[in-house]
Image (spheres, helix red, strand yellow):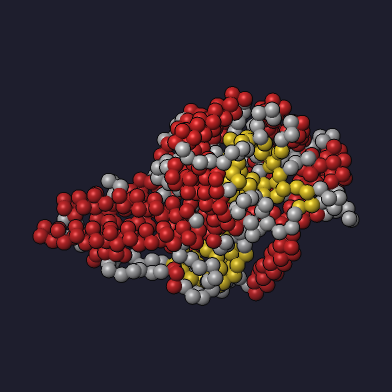
């Protein structure tokens, strides 16, 4: 067979080669789907449906507990959301109504209602809402399986190494996967915010999603190569392609092994200057693995995941449980929790936010939370309660002026007063800081530094706001560069303003995880680097080869250059010099 190249979306890194296990859950038969029933059979059909519902709830609750143990409470929210679907007045009661009014079988009632509701989700403009159709169909599949009186196909039963290929994987499918046997995942549908992507990354399974109609050319037992970094797949790869991929896998392994030596060492320069290297996380599971990757703490806990995978606003208790779990997992190491940063490219359907022409400049992050203070106050109370279980710090996102900072700080103090009055314990002396991701905040850093406990520079947004480039727009992507001289000057201003007031400055944007930027940031005096855990060993390795005094001189020289390419060239030349 000839080699066939397929392009999808790489959502979980890693190169893998294996035989295909084509996963096609058994569909209901036409005789069951289209069966009409006599009026005398209606009570029996209703009873079958109710029994299937109860069985489905029991199964989901068991999966929730399993997921909490293996992946963390935040991932269990995905499956908990499915239990709420069964309780929704537009779901199960509508099936009963169809059985009674249209004299259809329980199976057909399930099919009709599931497809109607899933279709409504798929018609919505927001990607997040479209992806919820998978949850509805997952619940429907479970009901149908239980109506048929069998347990269905279980992915947990796979006992040989395979590349799993499917139209899609539901949350309850994905949490059953054993990465000992599942080498990689390839699906017809799915995006970077889909449950499959999120869970595959958490499980450490390379994944390529969204290959579309190309999936129809893949058959059971085919040899398939996938690259979760680029999204490329090769069906029936030639021997030369396989050999090249095996070399790449070997290189990935050797590189990982070589860098792992540095993971659990402190990041100290050759002249004895030590920096703090911490992790960016979005889930409780990542907090467990970050220490093993060499993190000395958490510099950014994105709390959005807890909100984005719920069907309604998470309660104080639900938030407290997640924050407590992260605090305990870090075993006394610091955890910086960013308050809710929603809006822009991240939506919460249940908030019913207004449509905006430019959401990145609109009603988002701290602006939304100050307008709806009950949201922020609930989150701050949960953080304070969790603070007795670890070393927590708090930072507010997208602060643009002192008034916003002071309003947010006032809510922090209000949350403390409420808990104190209720006799609820919380830690003393919790550091409260702010993200610097808007140029106005950087330009006012000398004033902010008198009031905040720390700064954390978010370069991803700071670059797009400074150089007026939408970082999602591929047509202007070449203009998006954190080595732009204006961005570097803003970073310098923030660090120096903080140091004058005895305050530390961290960075949690993509620039912090780039080894090429390490000598520059070291020379500018950055105190804390926060990044995806997979980059920690690389940055520590880079720091070990540097002299801080040389980096200070280098940074001053780079700040005199006029373009980002000149700065990159100078950095590359510096890093290639013999030690």
Residue 153 on image: x %, y %? 38, 69
- For the point 52% across and 49% down, the residue is 324
Residue 83 on image: x %, y %? 35, 53
- For the point 54% across and 28% down, the residue is 410
Residue located farthest toward the top when viewing the structure as drawn: 403
Residue 381 on image: x %, y %? 49, 38
Query: Nearest the camera: 2 or 534?
Result: 534
Where is residue 137, by image quadrant?
A: bottom left
Residue 25 on image: x %, y %? 38, 66
Residue located farthest toward the front when viewing the structure as drawn: 423
Q: Is residue 379 visible?
A: no
Query: Nearest the camera: 488 or 522?
Result: 522
Q: Is residue 389 left or right of residue 490?
A: left
Where is residue 126, by image quadrant?
A: top left
- Above/below status of 570 relative to 186: above
Q: Is residue 70 visible?
A: yes
Quadrant of the drawing holding the C terminus: bottom right
Q: Is residue 78 left or right of residue 16?
A: left
- Above/below status of 559 relative to 522: above
- For the point 60% across and 53% down, the residue is 330
Residue located farthest toward the left when viewing the structure as drawn: 40
Query: Nearest the camera: 308 or 456?
Result: 456
Q: Is residue 410 left or right of residue 279?
A: left
Quadrant of the drawing holding the N terminus: bottom right
- Number of marks: 0
Where is residue 388, by image quadrant?
A: top right
- Above/below status of 285 relative to 383: below
Residue located farthest toward the right when viewing the structure as drawn: 578
- For the point 23% across and 59% down, the residue is 49
């Amino acid at each position: 067979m000839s080699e066939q190249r397929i392009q999808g979306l790489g959502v979980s890194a890693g190169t893998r080669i294996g035989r295909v296990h084509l996963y096609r859950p058994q569909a209901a038969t036409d005789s069951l789907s289209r069966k009409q029933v006599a009026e005398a059979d209606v009570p029996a059909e209703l009873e079958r449906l109710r029994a299937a519902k109860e069985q489905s709830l029991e199964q989901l609750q068991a999966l929730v507990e399993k997921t909490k143990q293996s992946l963390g409470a935040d991932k269990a929210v995905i499956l908990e959301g499915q239990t709420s679907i069964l309780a929704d007045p537009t779901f199960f009661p509508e099936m009963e109504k169809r059985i009674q009014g249209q004299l259809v079988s329980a199976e057909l009632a399930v099919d009709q209602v599931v497809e109607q509701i899933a279709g409504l989700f798929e018609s919505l403009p927001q990607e997040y809402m479209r992806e919820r159709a998978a949850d509805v169909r997952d619940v429907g599949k479970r009901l149908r399986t239980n109506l048929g009186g069998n347990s269905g196909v279980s992915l947990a039963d796979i006992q040989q190494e395979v590349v799993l290929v499917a139209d899609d994987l539901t949350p309850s499918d994905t949490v059953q996967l054993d990465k000992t046997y599942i080498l990689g995942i390839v699906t017809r549908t799915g995006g970077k915010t889909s449950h499959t992507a999120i869970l595959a990354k958490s499980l450490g399974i390379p994944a390529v999603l969204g290959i579309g109609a190309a999936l129809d050319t893949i058959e059971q037992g085919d040899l398939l190569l996938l690259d979760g970094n680029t999204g490329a797949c090769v069906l029936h790869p030639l021997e030369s392609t396989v050999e090249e991929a095996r070399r790449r896998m070997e290189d990935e392994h050797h590189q990982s092994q070589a860098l792992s030596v540095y993971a659990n060492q402190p990041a100290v320069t050759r002249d004895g200057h030590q920096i703090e290297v911490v992790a960016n996380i979005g889930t409780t599971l990542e907090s467990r693995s970050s220490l093993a990757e060499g993190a000395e703490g958490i510099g950014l806990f994105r709390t959005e995941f807890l909100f984005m995978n719920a069907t309604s606003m998470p309660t104080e208790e639900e938030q407290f449980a997640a924050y407590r779990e992260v605090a305990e997992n870090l075993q006394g190491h610091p955890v910086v929790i960013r308050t809710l940063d929603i809006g822009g490219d991240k939506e919460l359907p249940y908030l019913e936010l207004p449509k905006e022409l430019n959401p990145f400049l609109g009603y988002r992050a701290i602006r939304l939370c100050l307008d709806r203070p009950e949201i922020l106050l609930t989150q701050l109370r949960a953080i304070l309660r969790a603070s007795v279980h670890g070393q927590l710090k708090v930072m507010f996102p997208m602060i643009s002026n002192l008034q916003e900072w002071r309003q947010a700080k006032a809510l922090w103090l209000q949350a403390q007063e409420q808990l104190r009055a209720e006799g609820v314990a919380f830690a003393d002396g919790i550091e409260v800081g702010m993200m610097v991701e808007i140029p106005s905040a950087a330009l006012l850093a000398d004033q902010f530094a008198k009031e905040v406990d720390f700064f954390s520079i978010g370069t991803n947004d700071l670059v797009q706001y400074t150089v007026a480039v939408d970082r999602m727009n591929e047509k202007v992507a070449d203009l998006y560069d954190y080595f732009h001289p204006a961005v570097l000057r803003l970073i310098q201003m923030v660090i120096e303003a903080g140091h004058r007031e005895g305050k530390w400055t961290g960075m949690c944007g993509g620039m912090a995880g780039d080894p090429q930027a390490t000598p520059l940031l070291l020379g500018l005096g950055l105190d804390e680097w926060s990044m995806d855990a997979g980059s920690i060993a690389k940055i520590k390795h880079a720091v070990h080869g540097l002299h801080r005094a040389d980096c200070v001189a280098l940074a001053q020289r780079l700040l005199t250059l006029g373009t980002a390419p000149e700065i990159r060239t100078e950095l590359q030349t510096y890093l290639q010099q013999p030690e």
